[in-house]
Image: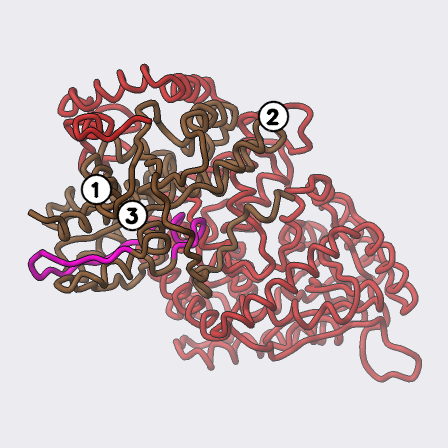
Chain colours: A red, B brown
Amino acid sequence: MSAEGPSPAFRPAAAAALKNPQLRANFRRAMDGLMAKRAAVFADPVEWRDLRALGSAIRARTLARLPELLERLEQSCLRHGIRVRWAETTEEANAIVLEILKAHGATHVVKGKSMVSEEMHLNDFLEEHGIESLESDLGEYIIQLDGETPSHIIMPAIHKNRQQIARLFGQKIREARYTEDVDELTAIARRVLRKKFFEAEAGISGVNFAVAETGTLCLVENEGNGRMSTHVPPVHIALMGIEKVVEKLEDVPPLYSLLTRSATGQTITTYFNMITGPRGQGEKDGPTEVHLVILDNGRSRIFADTELSATLKCIRCGACMNHCPVYTRIGGHAYEAVYPGPIGKILTPQTEGVGRRHDLLEASSLCGACVEVCPVEIPIVELLVRLRREAVQGDRSSAVLQAGQGRHVLEDVTWSLWEATHRYPSLYRLMAFAATRLRRLLPSGLPVLSAWTSVRATPRPASRTLHELVRKAGVPDA
Amino acid sequence: MMQRHHRASYDSEMSPPEPQRPAKPATVYYYGTCLVDLFFPEAGLSGIRLLQREGIRVIFRQGQTCCGQPAFNSGYHDQARAVARAQIDLFPGSEPIVVPSGSCAAMMKRHYPALFEGDPRAEEAEAFAARVFELTQFLSNVLDIQLADRGEKVRVTWHPSCHALREMEIGDEPKRLLAQLANVELVPLSRERECCGFGGTFAVRHPEISAAMVEDKAGDVLSTGAPIVLSGDGGCLLNIGGRLAAMGRPVGARHVAEFLWERTRER
């Protein structure tokens, strides 16, 4: 991703999603289910408060020592034979992956779920270079079949219902007969993938936590495809963003518990992989090479700001989107970003530019439902407001990408006028007098008003202001 | 990091704060808010009446205008600060400042300290913020107000504003007040804690998304069968009430202060 090119079309995409009743029903049903499951596993408020405080503290402590911990992670990995490569940009990361695959003559790759690989648009890149890259996570497999991107960071195909998936499988998988039975659909995907695991010359995965002290790569999953992708092919390439490091093994259990409970309401996932290097001498399974690619892609810039760096505390659970009233209604694709929902709203403008993605910053009622459930206490609302300020009042001294580039002359003038009328009581009184006396004459054609009246009655000011009622009632002014 | 102690903890869902009961003050300031001033003045006056009936002297500074939240949330912090400064100037002393809005109270209590960070008047802004109370919180937690219902039997539903819930950390205070009214039956919304889609300028910056949200909220209100939806925030009331009116449904969206006063006043 970069700050170049025209702004993505968030508004028309959101408007189209709102008019799609199937999509809205799919999201509403799915998010309701996820919210209920999460609430059930965090039923004890004291336990939630304590665990969350611990998770937040672990992430804050990690970020405070990020450069040092990344170096330690590299050393620990090297000790076990995990080869570590650093990539500043997604282009560099793609080139590294390609170089490793070429060295092994790999033409078939299986992938576990990885949001970093989505940042890299890795599948497209590999296809361009003649390498088949097959998603092995069921949700990812479904959307890859349909040529789509994930609409949710945990449940990438959540925008589709069972019937839509049944039709897709019927059309795209030759050996499959049409069925709407979930178990049968899963079995079809399993048969296809099983073969591919053994054909692939390399497996690619993400990383949920990378432990600096031990060089352990932790992978959280439910389907076993993560284990297959990382253990069956002879080469394993793990991809992670720089923020995924934690200091020690003890840090993992609380974060793991917060992650699975916040994401899907599970107290534990079916699989939890801890990868500590390639196959050792005399061992019978595992890849012969393990590579770790550590990607920056704009994260260092975020890290440099003491307030905005809280963005990097994220453990990618997706609870913020599950509870977001905006996400629930427009779904993940409308954001035109790798990371949708509240976390995407603060992350994407920082990596692509607050000017270019000003629309995302504004697409929040600041209701705070996301903050309430964030397992690592990211103050998403405060960061949104901060980034809005950077967009319209930031200057060159700011570290934020495209600071000041969300300005519009009309907005600047509007807020200056607003300031004047609300700073000087006499002006305010005049305005309030006009609004109350001309209450029936407000022109309904004003753009601001027509946006309001699209589904609401025209607002009419009262005939007398509170200031007037209070004066009349003899309430003292001092 | 922004100073932690000013950040809302956002866990009112799980653990409502213990009601601390400061001594009942002799005098309070009343901060009407611009939305109440222009659209719900009767509700504003009702809040004053409720306080006065408890024997409190209420001061209403005629110079007050707006807390600055619209500009603050839009990123125009220089303008917001200029307006906020003018408000702070109007409220000397140490008396509590009572606000019939969770959202405006949250702006002054939670966000003034951040807005004035590094400003020569930062300390003053902090001291001001510490004096701010939302009206139902003040009635319930500070005054421990006792209400006697004089109205007919009625069903109502309650919409808590997001900022009241999650920034002012108002738990069941408004509902406890309503529960004192013997003839009032509270029918809960099925998605009580979900945002109504107002969000200040959000409603006009992203009108389609906001519309989808308020359509759902109005639908939720209608499905309760209650003829009145109450809230403690003018923004939500304008939004939900505006939607119900456009649908031609005879459901009133009313401020809780006005409702409490109307039902308990001596006639």
Residue found at x 87% / y 58% = A72
Is tag 3's residue or tag 2's residue first in the polypeptide sequence?
2
Q: Is the residue marked by circle 2 packed among few (<14), some (14-19), or many (20+) residues within 10 Å?
A: few
Is tag 1's residue or tag 3's residue first in the polypeptide sequence?
1
Q: Is residue B165 magenta?
A: yes
Q: Which residue is mark 1?
A: B49
Question: Are callouts 1 and 3 both on one chain?
Answer: yes
Mark on residue B120? Answer: 2
- Residue in the foreground of this view, choosing between A373 and A190: A373
- Disc 1 marks which amino acid? Arg
Which circle, 1 or 2, is nearer the viewer?
1
Residue found at x 60% / y 48% = B4
Mark on residue B232? Answer: 3
Q: Label 3 vs label 2: CA separation?
A: 33 Å
Question: Are callouts 3 and 2 both on one chain?
Answer: yes
Assign a secondary structure to mark 1. helix
Relative to A241, is B58 on the left or the right? left
Locate the N terminus of chain B by quadrant: top right
Instruction: Name above or below for residue B175 compared with residue B109.
Output: below
Report the number of numbered marks: 3
Residue numbers of the magenta segment: B145-170
- Residue in the foreground of this view, choosing between B75 and A189: B75
Q: Is the residue marked by circle 3 packed among few (<14), some (14-19), or many (20+) residues within 10 Å?
A: many
